[in-house]
Amino acid sequence: MKLYKIFFSTLFLLIISFNGIAQVEPSYSLYRYNTNFFNPAAFGSDDKVTIKTNFRSQFLGIDYAPETQSISLGIPIKDKMNVGVIVIADKVFIEQNTSLFASFSYKIQVAKATDLLFGIQAGGSFVNIDFEKLHLPADPFLSQNTNYFNPNIGVGFYLKNDNYFASLSVPRLFETDRVADENGVATQANNKAQLYVSGGYHFNLSDAITFIPSTLVRVSEEEIITDATGTFEFFKKFDVGVNYRWDRAIGGLLYITIKDRLKLGYAYESNSSDINKYENGTHEFGLSFQF
């Protein structure tokens, strides 16, 4: 039974690495609440000191499946300026990637109740590749673990209004390599720049209920990943929604606001591919606290 699980875990994660060129950037079902994890400009959307955390475990039940832990701290320093820091620990198969970035955002009022924010971030990723987990015979290329640091920068824009929002960002502008390529054999994973485009609108159905459709599109050289989400907000305290990732997954989400300071979120995804037979879904938890 153990060998059976190891076989399917290895096969599935190799498919991810070959077809998706690894998991370049983490996915977030709660993207509307955690935009600052992929857009430095979004730090300026909070007017208070804010801590956000997010934990995502994909394909529960499969060994070495992707797992992402994220935390951010945003601090307003003036009416128009915010600073922030994010730490994202991303694990998949034999690779662990820990990213640390410092961010700065600047706000410009472009119309009544409408702000345009510009953000920039700088930092990098500490990469660890543990080849010992492969348990392969001695190989000159795979005999030693690999550790190194990839510096990078990112930019973003965020348009904020009481009724809508729009986000445009590239979290990492520089392409980085993780493993060497050898005679056409897929031993290299390239981190190429990804463009994030997101937006949403608030439709007030009544004094108590608001419908918020939103989308997140990630564009790279290899693929386009599209999320479409429909959320109902009740009394500005309780969100219930459905999320669909095009040709990949479908799921639901809950988000609760407690006394305008503490916010708790949960999302569940069911994969739409055949791997759904061997895993127990993807679970994501989010927490936000404002001082």
Image: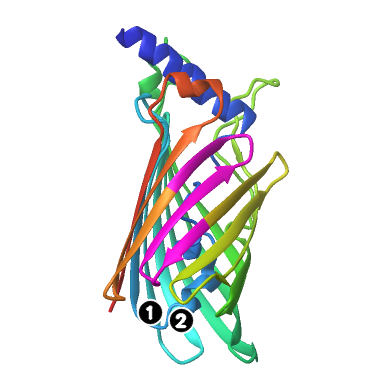
- Is 121 placed left or right of 63 in the picture? right
Viewer-closest of 104 and 214: 214
- Residue range in magenta is 231-252
Please report contact status of discs 1 and 2: CB closer than 8 Å, yes or no: yes
Residue 286 % position (x, y): 35, 56
Is 236 covered by the magenta stretch?
yes
> Hey, which residue is sitting farthest right in the picture?
221
Predominant secondary structure, magenta span = strand
One can see residue 37 in this view: no
Task: Give me the disc on residue 75.
Answer: 1
Residue 215 % position (x, y): 61, 56
Q: Which residue is mark 2?
A: 82
Q: Quadrant of residue 97?
A: top left
Relative to residue 149, is residue 52 depicted above or below? below
Relative to residue 285, is residue 289 depicted above or below? below
Q: Amino acid at mark 1?
A: Ile
Relative to residue 56, is residue 182 depicted above or below? above
Query: Residue at position x 47%, y 41% from top?
Result: 251
**Helix, strand or loop at mark 1:** strand
Viewer-closest of 200 and 7: 200
